[in-house]
Amino acid sequence: MKSVKLLLFFVIIFSCSVKSQTHWVVFTDKIGVDFDPFEYFDSKAIERRVNIGYDLYHISDFPVNESYILTVANCCDSISYCSRWMNAVSVWTDEHSLNRIAAFDFVQEIIPIEHGFVLCGKEIADAKIDTSILTNQLLVMQGDFFKEAGIDGRGVRIAVFDGGFPYVDTHPAFEHIRKDGRILKTWDFVKNKEFVYGYNSHGAMVLSCIAGIYNGQPMGLATGAEFLLARTEKNTEPFSEEVNWVAALEWADKNGVDIVNSSLGYTYHRYFPNEMDGKTSYVSIMANKAASKGILVVNAAGNDGDSQWTIIGAPADADSVLSVGGISPHTDYHISFSSVGPTADYRKKPNVVAFGQAIVAGKQDLTSAYGTSFASPLVAGFAACAKQVLPQKNAVELKEIIEKSGNLYPYFDYAHGYGVPQASYILNPEKEEIPTFSVIRDDDSWLFKINSNIKFDEESAKKTKHENYLYMAYVTDKGVVCQWGIIHVKTKSFPIIIDNGCEGTQTLQLHYRGYTLNINVGANDEK
């Protein structure tokens, strides 16, 4: 009897020591699987594919082989999602079962999935509402130009991935959307049901920055768009699997989405900084795949600019994602918490910026909130208007056009990207650069001088706004921005120090009031 008890005790201890975890099980093929795109897709998804010349019978859209799924299911604790795009199933199981699954000849690889999404914004508790921010969060993007042209995102379908959407079904800021029946579908990927009007209020605040109207005043630019709402995260400080994000992306594609707003990010909870290369995180890989299918993903850059992490997270690191950083509504300059670029492989990020503090829909009224979570939907609303103006452009083309619309373009730095998107460029892409300044060399010194055709008031120039900044970035021969900064322009002319920046520097880019000047400063071989 004693030996039996000891054996049972050993079995219990052994079983408790085997830790279960979530993994992607990726399959080798989709042999023997049938697919009818006209039965599976919403008509708008078909239309999007036809417009960009994408194969309606692309293998990535075929379902996962059911016999493979069933075989794997018999070896694990549970299955949560089958991804068509990845040809994979997410499983919850222990290491011993994974070894059995890995031995199947139809299994290509097994990839661990960790927790780690973070919502990129928070409400400012008990904050006094600055109504000027509500007006300026759209004016800074020239939203009045879209309004005058009758552009409001009508006919464009936007998916919002977030932690919940409480009071979207009751708040007056969303009444116009409810009245027109423009919330087309909802799905809670955490609880696997349709109801999303609860949980974290972050999603409601984000949606208001895309399409809210309060007391007749727009809060976002895409007030006429259609919406798909997906709850992908849970809890106040959510730590959910990337499975939900991938599932929501495929769901949104099936239901005809044009633009996805994702104010979420994977950073130190899941990855190391050197993995922010757009090719490591599966959410980044899937975001790029979405672009190939005509979907533009707009993603918050993150709120780690003043932390040890610093750089943007995934999927904002993906090539095809329109990554959005934050600027202060009080200065129009980089807001300290906004994550910066470059990516781990030195690609240009963020792409553009918008207000990192915004007025949003609160539980009862309006409230103030900060984070790139709100810069992202402000730009997503802009992107919807751009899509309405340019319906035939694919996701990559649309992203590039929005970059070119930036008020700093062609200047770029890792804090501001190409600047704040401008509606005037979308409506009239013939952007004329009028020289606003010159730089004169006198022996060993350089003199910055505002041109005589530019109106300049020294008193108003004392205010810290973007029109009073001289932006400076050193660019290497490989296109890497090695240093950047600003000078507050308070007088019509002043000396500036120009050197050759850092190793390999060839060009200094200077930008002031819509004009960019490139100065060849030579190469510096010293580290």
Image: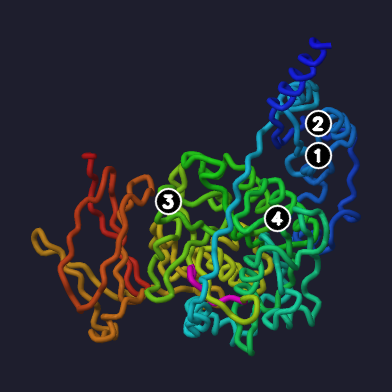
Q: Quadrant of residue 111?
A: top right
Cα distance in 3D space between marks 3 and 1: 35 Å
Which one is nearer the viewer's eye here, 333 or 293?
A: 333
Label 1 near label 2: C-beta < 8 Å?
A: yes
Residue drawn at 45 percent across, 54 percent down: 304
Residue farthest left in this picture: 443
Is 153 above or below relative to 27? below
Instruction: Name which of mark 1 and mark 4 comes first in the sequence.
Output: 1
Q: Marks 4 and 3, how far apart in space?
A: 25 Å
At a point 66% along the width and 38% down the height, the residue shown is 113
**Residue 427: percent from the left, percent from the top?**
56, 77
Q: Nearer the viewer, residue 229 or 428?
A: 229
- Which comes before the other along the chain, label 3 or label 2? 2
Residue 79 tag number: 1
* Coordinates of residue 349 in the picture (x, y in percent): 47, 54
Q: What residue does disc 2 label?
A: 76
Q: Position of residue 473 (x, y in %)?
A: 32, 58
Q: Which residue is mark 3?
A: 310
Look at the image and give the residue range highlighted in magenta: 354-361
